[in-house]
Each structure stands twice: as structure tokens, then as C-alpha cells.
């Protein structure tokens, strides 16, 4: 089993074409649903008593919800606006609400999880929760600008406490204070993390391990409508595939990154979670084959 810890949210997403208000979102939601296409995934998150039943039904269809806690108050909310190119997003509002005082616990049935993903969340919470699992084979974390600027030392400690970090290029530079991504990855590995995956949006990703650098291209798409959750979908698919294979050798990690690129591509083709909810295993296999054709020469 895989356990995903992080935020479940009600998002307001403003794109040039459409505005979505209070739709189901959150880093852990995207990651866990993406991972669920490969393996049974448990979610540890918090919602308020304003959380719509229809969204609860979606989560329960795809995920084990023993770790989902409902508290009195409002669900975490995020409001962001994309520019015309959909490449830059400006945060208009973040309301932590019930997330502010959430004290997460790991259900007994999750403690045996060999694979754990810590979505972009308070690094101190992530550091404490990873210790509550019995026998983790592979753990991975993500972070965002907000935590790097407010809790940089804790982010570094969190990176030391996991096997792999997934981070986007701008945040990697901000965190390490390096302009070159290779130097940036090396610095993170010096802090104690074994694997570094730097996401580069529509330009794919770079994977680092010891002296290995593995670049992978993004799946080429003509129509991108909503990039929200693409990075979380990438990370969820990656760790979901590793958990399914129950293997973390170099070749399997490289393959997991390709699955990450493919699931990320499904996520951005539709609004909100719709791109992840309506795909079948055959759709994923077909796109993997297309990807292989795309990079073969």
C-alpha cells in the first residue's frame, strides 16, 4: 500500500478561458488519485464540515479514506489565476482554515505502508509523520515557495528525512540559492537525500542520483487547459508505479518518471481533477507507447 499525506482543498482556479470555483483540489488529492491508477492508495488529510458530499464520493471511489479527518470549520481553500500562456500562476488567496491546527495521525492500517509520499505541506508536520511508519522502503516529498520562504531550515531537514525530493526548477533554485540546476541538485544530495527530481513543467524533468543525470521530456500536447495539479499528478504516478512494482532500482525509477510525465499530461488536458478521473489503464498504456515512439531515434 501507498500512503499520501498532504492537503485536500477547495480550489478556485482562474484561467483565460474559464473560472472554476470551489472545485476539489489539493496536492495530496491530485497525487493520491494519480497514484491510485497503479496501486491502492491511502490518504491522510483534513477537511472541514463544509466539504461537499459529491467530492467525498469521488475520493472514496478512488482512495482509502481511513486517514481523512473531518474537523469543525472550513476546508482549506486556494485561489489562483493563470496568465494567458498558462505558464505563470499568481496566488490570490490562501486560507488554511482547518489545516492550520491539524494534528495528523497515521491509522494503524497505514503504518505498514512501504511507500510514503509527503505532498507539499508544512515541513515540520512532514518530518514528524514520516517517523510514524514502521518500515518505509521509499519515501518522497515535495515543497513549494511558501514553505521555502517561511521555513527554509525545516524544508532542508525534511529533505534529509526522505529518500527522494520532487521539486520544480524555480523552487530548487530558491531553496539551494544556486542558478544552475545541476549544482542545485548536488547541493540537495549533499544535504542527505538520495534522489532529486527537478520538474520543469512543459519541458519535462531532470532526475539526479549520484553521478547519474536522466533528462526526460514532457509528453507533447496541443491543448493544455489547466496546469493545476500537474506536478502533484507527476509525483503521485511516480511513487504509485514504484509501489506497484515494489522496486526502487535505477531502471524502475526512470520508468516511474516516464509514467509521471504521462499522468501529468492527462491532468492538464481537462479542468481540475477531470483529466485524472476519466482515464482507464488502456489510455495510460496507449500514451506510454506514444511516448516511447516520441523519444526513440
Image (cartoon, rainbow, N blue to C red):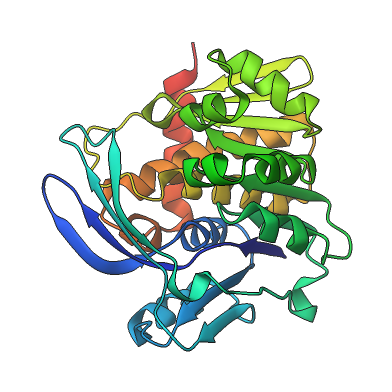
Q: Residue at x 56, y 71 (%)?
A: 45
In the displayed structure, 99 sits above or below 263; it is below
Q: Residue at x 42, y 40 (%)?
A: 287
- Name the foreground residue: 21 vs 245: 21
Q: Left or right? Give the position of 128 relative to 233.
A: right
In the displayed structure, 256 sits above or below 196; it is below
Q: Left or right? Give the position of 238 relative to 95.
A: right
Q: Residue at x 51, y 86 (%)?
A: 71
- Name the foreground residue: 3 vs 106: 106
Residue 154 coordinates in the image, percent (x, y): 69, 46
Residue 34 coordinates in the image, percent (x, y): 50, 56
- Name the foreground residue: 6 vs 287: 6
Q: Which residue is drawn at 43% across and 29% down?
A: 218
- Name the foreground residue: 161 vs 134: 161
Is residue 286 in view from this perspective? no
Is residue 173 in view from this perspective? yes
Residue 202 coordinates in the image, percent (x, y): 37, 29
In the displayed structure, 201 sits above or below 42; it is above
Pick the quarter of the image with the N terminus: bottom right
Q: In which quarter of the image is residue 110?
A: bottom right
Residue 208 coordinates in the image, percent (x, y): 68, 23
Amino acid at each position: 500500500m501507498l500512503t499520501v499525506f498532504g492537503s485536500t482543498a477547495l480550489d478556485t482556479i482562474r484561467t483565460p478561458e474559464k473560472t472554476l470555483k470551489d472545485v476539489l483540489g489539493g496536492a495530496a488529492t491530485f497525487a493520491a488519485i494519480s497514484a491510485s491508477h497503479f496501486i491502492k492508495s491511502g490518504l491522510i488529510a483534513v477537511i472541514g464540515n463544509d466539504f461537499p458530499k459529491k467530492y467525498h464520493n469521488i475520493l472514496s471511489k478512488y482512495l482509502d479514506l481511513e486517514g481523512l479527518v473531518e474537523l469543525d470549520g472550513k476546508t482549506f481553500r486556494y485561489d489562483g489565476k493563470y496568465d494567458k500562456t498558462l505558464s505563470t500562476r499568481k496566488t490570490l488567496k490562501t486560507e488554511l482554515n482547518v489545516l492550520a491546527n491539524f494534528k495528523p495521525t497515521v491509522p494503524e492500517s497505514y503504518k505498514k505502508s512501504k511507500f510514503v509520499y509527503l505532498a507539499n505541506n508544512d515541513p515540520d508536520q512532514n518530518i514528524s509523520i514520516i517517523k510514524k511508519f514502521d518500515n518505509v522502503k521509499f519515501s518522497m516529498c515535495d515543497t513549494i515557495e511558501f514553505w521555502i520562504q517561511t521555513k527554509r531550515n525545516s524544508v532542508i531537514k525534511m529533505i534529509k528525512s526522505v529518500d527522494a525530493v520532487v521539486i520544480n526548477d524555480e523552487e530548487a533554485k530558491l531553496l539551494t540559492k544556486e542558478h544552475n540546476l545541476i549544482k542545485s541538485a548536488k547541493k540537495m544530495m549533499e544535504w542527505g537525500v538520495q534522489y532529486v527530481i527537478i520538474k520543469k513543467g512543459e519541458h519535462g524533468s531532470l532526475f539526479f542520483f549520484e553521478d547519474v543525470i536522466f533528462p526526460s521530456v514532457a509528453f507533447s500536447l496541443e491543448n493544455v487547459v489547466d496546469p493545476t495539479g500537474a506536478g502533484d499528478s507527476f509525483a503521485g504516478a511516480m511513487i504509485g508505479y514504484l509501489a506497484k512494482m515494489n522496486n526502487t532500482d535505477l531502471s524502475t525509477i526512470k520508468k516511474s518518471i516516464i509514467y509521471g510525465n504521462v499522468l501529468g499530461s492527462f491532468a492538464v488536458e481537462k479542468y481540475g481533477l477531470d483529466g485524472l478521473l476519466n482515464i482507464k489503464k488502456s489510455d495510460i498504456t496507449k500514451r506510454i507507447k506514444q511516448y516511447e515512439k516520441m523519444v526513440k531515434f
